Image: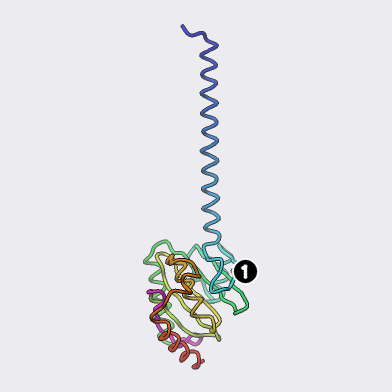
Amino acid sequence: MIPERYVAQGCFAMKRKVAVWTSVVIALLAVIVLLSACQYSQPLPDSLAGLALVRHVEGDEASEFINRLHGKGVTPESNVVGFYQGEAGKATVYLSTYRQTEHANDAYNRMARLIEGGNPVFGHFRTVEVESRAVAFCLGLGRAHYFFASEANLYWLEVDIPIAFDTIRDLVGHVQGNGSQQERSSRPTTNRLKFRQQFSTFAHAI
């Protein structure tokens, strides 16, 4: 028969191992949650076409900011607004995340219809191809505007006209995971000249 003191020692050692492993699992879960929170808190790229992300807002503050621009409630529950700035100019990215992909597509189609049908703020509506993706384009308030849906996300880019093409190309490339900004800058784009010619025509029409 095993003496009671050995049994007690064995139970104590087992409990200590369980406690250690429990602590390790809790710590790992905490790290995963923290990393997930960090990823959510800044889902936008750190830079676009040489413009740095200087500030971003999310949650209620972002929702209020976007709704204030529209003069009414238009946003889903999850929203982020990123402000970019550099020597070349400024840009703002509005990102709204919907519960389902079809909701984001519905919002995209609704905005496209409203602008294409005639709008006091936005004009010269076109659908252009950027990184093999169809992107809605328009001009308004002296700036270029692009918007597109990707899965459950709806992106709207507002950017200074001289840097519009490079900025939207970087944003679409980031969303699609098409490599680094440097790779995109050196990658030949078959529609680039045609797009720039069309864009120049739109810009002169402001």
Which amino acid type is marked by label 1? Val
Q: Is residue 198 left or right of residue 49?
A: left
* Secondary structure of the residue carrying numbered label 1: strand
The colour scheme used here is rainbow
Main structural element of the magenta stretch: helix, strand or loop? Answer: strand
Asked if the magenta segment contains residue 126, the reply would be yes
Give the residue displayed 55% in from the left and 59% down from the top.
41
Outermost residue toward the bottom?
205
In the picture of the structure, the residue carrying the numbered disc 1 is: 54
User: Which of 107 and 93 lies nearest the eye of the viewer?
Assistant: 93
- Labels in figure, total: 1
User: Which of 91 and 51 lies nearest the eye of the viewer?
Assistant: 51
Residue 37's place in the image compared with 143, above or below, is: above
Q: Within 10 Å of the Cα at label 1, are there few (<14), some (14-19), or many (20+) other Cα atoms?
A: few
Q: Which residues are magenta?
A: 119-133
Residue 115: image location, x then y, percent: 44, 83
Residue 11: image location, x then y, percent: 51, 19
Residue 73: image location, x then y, percent: 51, 71
Residue 59: image location, x then y, percent: 55, 62
Give the residue displayed 50% in from the left and 89% down from the top.
203
Residue 201's place in the image compared with 46, above or below, is: below
Asked if the magenta segment contains residue 61, the reply would be no
Residue 180's place in the image compared with 145, above or below, is: above
Give the residue displayed 50% in from the left and 62% down from the top.
78
Specify the quadrant of the image occupied by residue 151: bottom left
